[in-house]
Amino acid sequence: MTTRANIVVIGGGLAGMSAALEALHQTRNAVGVSVALLEKEARTGGNSAKASSGINGVLTRTQKAQGVADSVKAFARDTERSGHGRSNETLVHKLTEDSTAAVTWLQKEFGLDLDVLAQLGGHSAPRTHRRPEVGGKPQPVGWGIVSALAERLGAFARDGSGRFRLETGARVTQLLKASDGGVAGAEYETANGARHRVQADVVVLATGGFAGEGARPEFLRQFAPQLAGLASTNGAFATGDGLRLASALGAALVDMDQVQVHPTGFVAAADPANPTKFLAAEALRGEGGILLDAQGARFVDELDTRDRVTAAIFHHCATPDTCARHNSTTSGQGPSAAAFLVLPQAAADRFGLGSLGFYAKMGLVSRADGVDDLAAALRVDAKVLRKTLDAYDTARSTSGQSDAYGKSVFPEAVAAAEAYFWGVVTPVIHYCMGGLRFDVRTRVLRAADGAPIRGLLAAGEVTGGLHGVNRLAGNSLLECVVYHHGG
C-alpha cells in the first residue's frame, strides 16, 4: 500500500513529536499539506519519557523568579567543557542561545510547570528545570513533557482535517531514494507484517540512539566494544535504526565511539544482575546526595561531569572491599563496581519525598534513622562514616573553597540529619553522543562530500557532533526541542 504525506517524521520521542508539531505549525496556512509520524513501538514517548532530572535553559522566567544569575556564554562554556573540546561550537551556540525559547515554549504553549531548578554536575549555575511534586506525588519531567505533546498531536489526529496522522507499531525498514540521491519517502512494516510505502518531500529522523541494543549490541561491538555487556538505562527499542536507514543513503556518521556511561543506575536488591537499570536521577546528587564506597568514604566531587564521576566509581569502588552492595547481596552478585548514594533528610526534601517514595516502592531506595542506623544498613564502621560526614560539612562551611575532591558546591549539610535515604548505584550505558552528522538547520550531511542529503533532516539522539565526548546533564531534552525544525 502506498500513501503520501508531505513531511514524514520517524520516531515518536520528544524530538519526533516536537518536529511533527513544528511542521504542523509552519504549514498551518498551507492547503493540502500533511504530516505523518511513524513510531515502531505501541505508544509514543521513547527514552524521553524516562528523563527525570530536567531540561536546561538560561534566562528563563524560572531563573528570573529565583534570582539566578546565568548567561548563554556560561551555559555554552559548560557544555563545551563537558564535551572536552570535541563539541561542534556552532551546534552548541544554537543549543544554548535557543534554550530560553525552548523552555518558554514548553511553559507557555503547554502550561508545563517547569518551576524547580537544580545545579547538576558540570554546571556553573542552577539551570536544569523540572516539575514540582503536587500533593506529595511526583511529576516526572520527561513523562510530563511527552504526555503534553502527545495530547496535542492526538487532537490534530482527531480533528478531521487530514493534516496529521500517527501510526504506531510502524517499523521503518528503508528510506526511499530519489533519482537525485535525495529522499523520497519511507517503507515500513506494521505489526501484522504488512508492508507500506509513504511518499514524502521531507523525512525527519528522530529514532534515538543505540544504547538499548541489549544482548545483540551491533553498534556497541563495532564502535565501543569495551562497553558491550554493561547494563543500560535505555528501552530495548533504542537500536540505532535511523543510523542504518541514513547510512544506506550515504549519510556521514560522527563520534560513534562516544557512548555515555551514566555514573548512577540503581541496583535493585531483589535483582542486582538485571541488565536494565532504573536511572538514579542526576538531581539526586544535584540536591545534595553524596557518594560513598563500601568503607563509608567519599571519593569524588558528586557534581563533576558524568564521565569523571563514572571513572571515579570504576577506580575507587571496584574491589570486594570497596564495591557497595545490598545486605542481601554477596560478593560476585551484581555489578563489579558500585557505590552508595546517600541523601540526608534536607536533600531528600529538596528532591521530593514523593519521588523517593516511588523509588522505595520499586525496591531501589531505603530509609535509615540517623547515622548509626545508616552505618548498620551500609555495613560500614559508624566512626568512619561520621568522620566522612563531618569532613563534608566542614568543607561546606568554608565558603568559596573546594574540598579534597574539588567540590565547591555543597547543597546541604549531611552530618546531623534525622533521617537518610540511600541506595546502591552503578555506572550504566545511558546515551550516544555520536550519530548522524548534521548542521544547525538539522540537515543530514553526506559522507562523500559533506553536502546535505536533500529532504533528509534529523533531530535528537540520532544525531552526533553536538555533545563531543560527554553530554552535559539536562541537554538531551533540550536538544530535542531546539533542533526540532529544519531550515
Image (cartoon, helix red, strand yellow):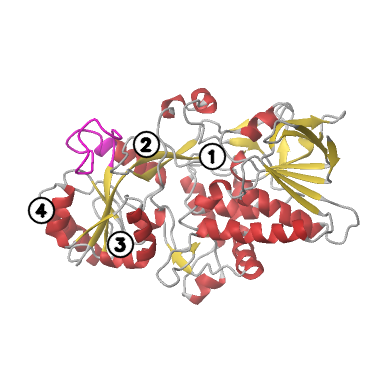
User: What is the secondary structure assignment of the residue under circle 2?
Assistant: loop
Label 4: how many Cα within 10 Å (few below 14, some 14–19, many 20+): some
Q: Secondary structure at mark 3?
A: loop
Residue for badge 4:
382
Q: Does residue 460 appear left or right of residue 404 in this picture?
A: right
What residue is at 58 percent from the left and 42 percent from the top?
461
**Residue denoted by label 3:** 410
Tag in front: 2 or 4: 2
At label 2, counting other C-alpha atoms closer than 10 Å, the crowd grade (few under 14, some 14-19, many 20 or more) is: few
Residue 25 lies, in percent from the top left, at 77, 60
Report the residue that reaches farthest toward the front.
Answer: 192
Q: Which residues are magenta?
A: 315-338
Tell me the CA gap for discs 3 and 4.
Answer: 22 Å
Q: CA distance from mark 3 to mark 2?
A: 33 Å
Q: From the viewer's side, name the closer residue of 158 and 428.
A: 158
Residue beneath disc 1: 433
Q: Which label belongs to residue 127?
A: none
Amino acid type at mark 4: Ala
